[in-house]
Image (cartoon, rainbow, N blue to C red):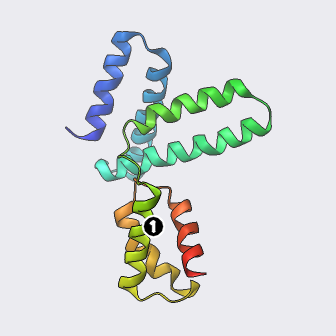
């Protein structure tokens, strides 16, 4: 079953179960997917749907930072709950050890020696870590290893 179909089925089951918060988050996800399809005049495949969901999680993490600094614990809790629902559709996250191994292999494979070679390493790591790790954190780890 395609990821979009799974999300739609989960929306229906959340509706039947009366889970209002979960239903609202799933509807937001479907709306974001539909918006991208309309904007680009395409039908999204699973990889593209994952990128939409990752973007939504990233937006919520940024919002949590803002709400926490503003002292809005109620909104922090709401955003955290939305992240939990969205992460149910994302693949399992890589552990720090797996990520370090992947980066080390990429550095060896590309022959990277300095921070100038970061683009090569990032290009080698990205396809394997996409959706399974925060690419900002991956970038910081690569910078630390090369610098």
The residue sitting at the left extreme is 1
Seen as rendered, the residue at the extreme front is 97
Taking 72 as reference, is 28 left or right?
A: left
- How far across and down, in percent of the image, does residue 43 sit? 29, 47
Q: Residue 138, percent across and down?
A: 51, 64
Front residue of 76 and 52: 76
Which residue is rendered at x = 75% and y = 28% of the image?
A: 72
Name the residue beneath numbered marker 1.
100
Q: Position of residue 89 (x, y in %)?
A: 36, 38
* Quarter of the figure with the C terminus: bottom right
Q: Nearer the viewer, residue 14 or 100?
A: 100
The correct choice, above or below, for 97 with respect to 71 in the image is: below
Write the residue at 43% across / 61% down. Answer: 97
Q: Position of residue 17 (x, y in %)?
A: 36, 10
Tell me which residue sits at (50%, 20%) in the image: 21
Q: Quadrant of the N terminus?
A: top left
């Amino acid at each position: 079953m395609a990821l979009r179909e799974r999300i739609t089925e989960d929306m229906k089951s959340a509706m039947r179960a009366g889970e209002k918060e979960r239903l609202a988050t799933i509807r937001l996800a479907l709306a974001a997917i539909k918006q991208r399809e309309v904007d680009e005049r395409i039908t999204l495949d699973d990889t593209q749907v994952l990128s939409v969901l990752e973007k939504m999680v990233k937006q919520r993490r940024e919002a949590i930072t803002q709400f926490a600094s503003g002292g809005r614990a109620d909104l922090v809790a709401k955003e955290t709950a939305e992240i939990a629902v969205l992460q149910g559709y994302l693949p399992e996250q890589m552990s720090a050890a797996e990520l370090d191994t992947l980066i080390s292999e990429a550095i060896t494979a590309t022959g990277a020696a300095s921070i100038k070679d970061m683009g090569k390493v990032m290009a080698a790591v990205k396809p394997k870590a996409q959706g399974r790790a925060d690419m900002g954190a991956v970038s910081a780890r690569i910078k630390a290893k090369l610098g």
